[in-house]
Image (cartoon, rainbow, N blue to C red):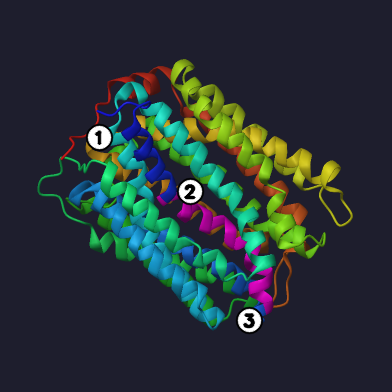
Amino acid sequence: MLRFDSRQGRMVIFAAVLGSGIAFLDGSVVNSALPQIRRTFDSSLAGQQWVVTGYLLTLGSLLVVGGSLGDLYGRRRMFVYGLVGFSITSMLCGLAPSVGVLIAARILQGVSAALLVPGSLAMLSSVFHPDDRAKAIGSWSGLAGASTAVGPFLGGWLIDTVSWRWVFLINPPIAAAAIVIALRAVPETRGDNHGARVDAPGALTLSLGLAGVVYALIEGPAAGWEPTAVFAATVGVVMLVAFAFIEVRSSHPMVPLSLFRSRLFAGTNAATFVIWGAIGTVFFFLTIHLQDDLGYSALEAGSASLPVTVMMLFFAAKSGALAQRIGPRLQMTVGPLVVAASFLLMARIEAGSSYLIGVLPAVLVFGVGLVITVAPVTATVLAAVDDTHVGIGSAINNAVARVASLLAIAVLPALAGATGRDASLSDGYAKAMVICAALAALGAVICALTVDNNEARARSISTEPAGVH
C-alpha cells in the first residue's frame, strides 16, 4: 500500500489529476468558447447546447462501463487507453470544419473520457493505505476541481490570443505526460470479479435512452415539439425503461442495484444528482452571460472564477481530512447551502454590474461551498462500496454528476424562458440561477436525511484496498 507522503504516492496523484483534469477541464473550458464557436459556425442556441451536451451524453452514459472495464481488465490500463483516445478526439474537435463535425467529435471525446475518469479515482482508492486514502482523494478533488475552475481562465486566454480551437489542441501534450507518469508510477489493480462481463445491452439502452430524451428536451422547445422531437422522446423513454428491466434481470448488470441498498450510497448519489446538475448549469450560463451581456472578453470571463481555483487548491484536501475525522454529514449539509447562497448572489449579476461588487462576492461564496462539499461527497461514495466495486462505485457517482449536468443544461434554458430558434441565454439567466439555488438546497436536505457519520467513518476505516497486480 502506498503512503500519501511517499514520492510514488505523489506521482500517482499527479497522474490521476493530469488525466482526469483534462476531462474535467474540457467540460468547463468549452463554455468560454461557446460565443466564438457560435460566431464561427453561425450556430443557434441549440447548437451551443449540443457542443456541451454531446460530450456529457456519452461521458455520462458510458462512465459505468468504463469503471466496469477497469475493474475487469485493469484500472491503469483503461486509464491509459482513455488518454490515448482523448488525445485523438481532441485533435478532431480542434480541426472541425463545421458545428456538426464538432458535435460528433465531442460525442467521441466523451467516450474516451468515460474510460479515464473512473480509472483515475479508482487508482487512488486501490493503491493507497486506508489511513491515507481520504487525504489522497482530497488532494485529487482539490486539484481536479481546480482544473475545472481554471478551465475558463485558460480557455479564455487561448480564445482571445489564438483561437477557440486551441482549447482542444492543448489536450494531447497533457495527456502524453499523464500516460508516461502512469506507466512508470501507478501499480496495476483490478477487482476480484471472476466470471464478470461487460453489460453491453445495458450500455446500449442507457446511451440511446439518454440521447433520445436529451434530443427532445433541446430541440422540442425550440421547434415547437415537431414529430421528430416527440418520436425521439418516445424512443428515449422506452430505452430507459428497457435499461431498468435489463439491469434487474442481468447476472452482470452495468449498475449493480445491490449497491443502492446502502442508504449512504443511494443518498449521496441522489444529492450528487441535484447539486451537480445545478453546478454544471451555472457554469454554462454564467460564462456566456458575462461575455454576451456584460461585455467581458473570453479571458475576462474565465478569470472571474480564479478565486475558486485558489480556494480548491489550498483547502480541498483539508476538507477531506476534516470529513474523515468528524464525519461527512455536517459538511455535506452546510456546503450545498453555501453553494445555493452563491447562486442567489449570481442571480443579481446584470448588465452594468462591476466585478468587485457584483461578481466577486458570488464567486467567493461559491468557492467556499465547493471546498466544503466536493471532497466529503467523493470520499463518502467510495466508502459506501467494497473494493471489488470501487471502480463501478466511483463511475456511478461520476455518471450521476455528468447526467445531471446533461439533463439540467437541456432542460433549464426552456424552464427559464430561453426558448425558440433565436433565443438567448440572457432571456432567462436570473430565473435559471434561482432554480439552481433551489436544487443545491434540495441536495443539502437529502444529505442531512441520508448521511450517517458513524456508517461513513466505519466503512472508510474498514475498507481494504483491492489487490495490486
Alpha carbon of mark 3 to alpha carbon of mark 2: how far? 29 Å
Circle nearer the viewer, 1 or 2: 1
Q: Position of residue 304 (x, y in %)?
A: 72, 49
Dot 3 corresponds to which residue?
41
Specify whether residue 167 is painted magenta.
no
Q: Is residue 77 visible?
A: yes
Q: Which mark is residue 401?
A: 2
Specify whether residue 36 is painted magenta.
yes
Q: Secondary structure of the magenta portion, mostly?
A: helix
Q: Is residue 60 visible?
A: no
Badge 1 local density, few (<14 within 10 Å), some, or many (20+)? many
Instruction: Classify mark 2: helix, strand or loop.
Output: helix
Q: Which mark is residue 46?
A: none
**Residue at the farthest right position:** 352
Instruction: Classify mark 3: helix, strand or loop.
Output: helix
Instruction: Classify mark 1: helix, strand or loop.
Output: helix
- Residue stretch in magenta: 19-39
Q: Residue at x 50, y 29 (%)?
A: 317
Residue type marked 2: Ala
Circle nearer the viewer, 3 or 2: 3
Dot 1 corresponds to which residue?
387
Q: Residue at x 27, y 26 (%)?
A: 463
Q: Quadrant of residue 61?
A: bottom left
Residue type marked 1: Asp
